[in-house]
Image (cartoon, rainbow, N blue to C red):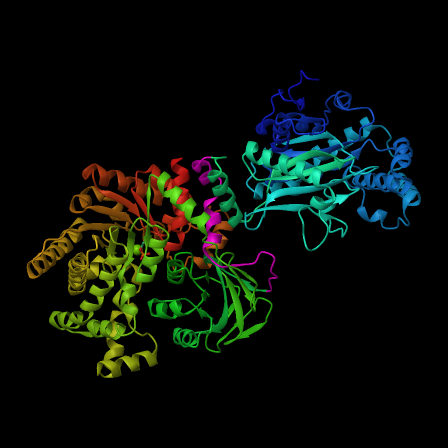
Amino acid sequence: MQSDPNTTYVTQTAPIATETHGGRAKCLQRLVRLDLPVPATVALSFTTVGNIANGELPDVDAVVDQFPKDALLCVRPSSQDPDWGGPGAVLNIGMNDARFENFSKVMGEDAAAALYTRFIQSYAINVARLDPDMFDDVQGEGRRALEETISAYEHETEEKFPQSRRTQLAAVLRSMARAWNGTSARLLRQAKGAPADAGLGLVVQQMIFGLGAGQCGSGVLQLVNSETGAPQVTGRYLSQSQGRDALGGNAEALYLTRDPRGPSLEEKMPEAFETLKTYASLMRKRLRAEMHVEFAIEDGVVHILDGVRVSRSSRAAVRIAVTLAEDGIISREEALMRVQPRLLTELLHRQIDPAAQRDIIGTGIAASPGAATGRLVFDSAEAQASAARDEPCILVRRETTSEDVRGMHAANAILTEKGGITSHAAVIGRGIGLPCVVGASSIEFNPRDKTITSEDGRVFREGDQITVDGSTGQILVGAAKMQEAALDEYFQKLMLWATDSADIKVRANADTPADAQTARNFNAEGIGLCRTEHMFFDAGRLTVMREMIFADTSDGRRAVLERLLPMQREDFTQLFGIMRGQPVCIRLFDPPLHEFLPMDASGQRELAEALGLPRSDVTRRIEAMREYNPMLGLRGVRLGITVPEIYEMQARAIFEAIVDASEDGDAVIAEIMIPLVSARREVELVRSAIDAVAHAVSQERGVEFEYRLGVMVETPRAALRTSEIAPNCAFLSFGTNDLTQMTYGLSRDDAGRFMSDYVQQGVFDEDPFHTLDYDGVGELLTLGAQRGRASQPDITLSVCGEHGGNPESIAFCREAGFDYVSCSPFRVPVARLAAAQLAI
Ligand code: PEP
Ligand code: MG
């Protein structure tokens, strides 16, 4: 048999690979090579098991011959990745009438009968595929229960229970091999990322008896806490037991270390405990991982049966990886590779405790991760009033607009009926780290009555408490049990290592000093996008902004903007101060002006009063500004050219802030970005206006300063024409939100309504606002980058749309030669880890 490479006795030398025999077989061989007391084991390869499933058994006699004549055997699955699962283990193969009589003498009849009964039942269910209920009527214990079990088996199968170890083993192998090919098993593992042709290996092992005379039992042990990753010997041990019985909640099971809750293995069997700890430490060191060890004790002697990687929470995954690197067991690079970037998202926010009960009202799109509980409010003013009373609240809107930003800042979470992953609520929510669910159209929204109605007809009113889970998109009744964010020292260390390894930079999209501080705390390498329009919604500014919009002449606008200037200057001075030494890219005003105007009657009445104008005038002007398709209307650079006073004021505020912040000793790297460009001439016009302001401020203040001017590439035409746009600028930043919207001709605010249908029917693989469309939008990015760089080789290239925080998109940007990505501050850690993994 040793000549058959597919059916391998696990020794020090026989070659066994995870790719051919599975992870469990590979791990067992490593334990054998460490001279640990592992029972005799035979590993069957994927090929062999595949053949068994097709009815072609290997030489089972040769397998059986590898074990002592009287030994019982067990078979366990060995898939390539333990997460892919596999059929349950079958223990005690070889048990029969004769062995029952023998064991009765050694361990007593009742114990032997219990063992045999269990084996027959497990064989009946797993191998003969009988209905588990058929043993419900088995009464009593010991020999009587055994006899009833045998008779139930024989009655149902019309066959004698097989007595030969060989026959039993062959049947177990066949049933496990076939179970792997079952539809539900296949779907389950494919959901966990297994390829369609994933193979199964099987491991046949000699049973170590945790039953019988002397100190016998079995248990599991690991050296860390699975929830926190902190060093802590955990596990249980149960005397006179097998397999994973110790974990079954038996009150007799011992703790491993001394424990106030009950007796421990450390106290009862100190030597065995010490031996186990030594073995487990050796496994940690040599297998270079925290291991969950399955062991058995037979007559006082410790045996190691199996080892798998410890299951772990996201938080524990980070701590385990960092600690292994700090202990010199793995390299820092390997530690970085061992943490999935997306897991970090869970650490950055409060989460619903995975074990918590969930009473679900409805589900929408998970737009900004984290969870929060609060009372329902239906407008921004109520949200602010709630915050003033220190009462957590959930802001519910059909959709949000810029006017809701203050309410969003005051709320603990946002829930909207409409919108997709790049809708206003979603972008702001991610930006400020606020849990957000959008497009929850399965819930009925009744803003007039201030109620929402669940899918099953329950009505929730203003003031009722609900929980929003922005990580799953679920809305829950009441207050769910939470888990705190975990930005501990291990997380910080991993982040520092990530920055050292990455070769594409990560900046943050940050609009306020608070965002900038978050970005700084997460070690973002600058601000890649400051959306300045959000600054005009602050208290005291909105009315001034509206006055500016209503001014009839250029001079009138300038006069009002004079009053906004010091406020903008202060905004920028603060940003430069917080980001000192790091680049800050400020995007000039982008949205259409009517977003700043009230659309409802009462708002228009208040505005008329504030401006001292007749109400009809206000209504008429607002009507006149209405656009059929505002996202494609008068916004961005088009406003910059037709209402130049706004950009001039912003440029002046930026330049004066550069001078002020530099006087305070801050090193300032200022970048100014023009949004929604589609033609070279737009850039030339804005550039000369801004240069003129720079010149004027420089003359007035008597100092020279530097700044970089760049273009936001977010229309398909700009992407196609970068060769003529690039010579006018120091950088090109691709706004993939608008670029996706315009490439598809798909409204980013309305796509949520039908996106799930589109994805379900396979029209789109994914929501393109969430995962970059490499084929279409990606081609524009590649073309734009190539043409821009060809005409201006030292130009800086970046992506600042929401895709910037997505690991796959970062890989794409890195390949395409981009210098940095910029994403919401709370996505910076994920992006940094993803960037590091790409470079390793
Ligand atoms: C974009 O369009 O990709 C972008 C970053 O700008 P905004 O989301 O503000 O339109
Ligand atoms: Mg845009």
For the residue pair 666 and 532, the one nearer the viewer reads as 666
List x then y, in percent, for residue 179: 70, 37
In this rendering, is residue 441 above or below 580?
A: below
Quarter in which the C terminus is drawn: top left
- Using the rendered image of the protein, determine whether residue 87 is visible from the camera's viewpoint: no
- Using the rendered image of the protein, determine whether residue 732 is visible from the camera's viewpoint: yes
Is residue 622 toward the left or the right of residue 45 in the image?
left
Ligand 1 in which quarter: bottom left
Q: Is residue 448 magenta?
A: no
List x then y, in percent, for residue 702: 7, 58
Q: Please give the range of residues in magenta.
A: 331-359
List x then y, in percent, for residue 286: 56, 31
List x then y, in percent, for residue 558: 14, 69
Quarter in which the N terminus is drawn: top right
Q: Residue at x 53, y 72 (%)?
A: 465
- Quadrant in the rendering for residue 354: bottom right
- Quadrant in the rendering for residue 634: bottom left
Q: Is residue 339 magenta?
A: yes
For the residue pair 38 and 715, the one nearer the viewer reads as 38
In this rendering, is residue 396 above or below 285?
A: below
Q: How many marks?
A: 0
For the residue pair 491 and 622, the one nearer the viewer reads as 491
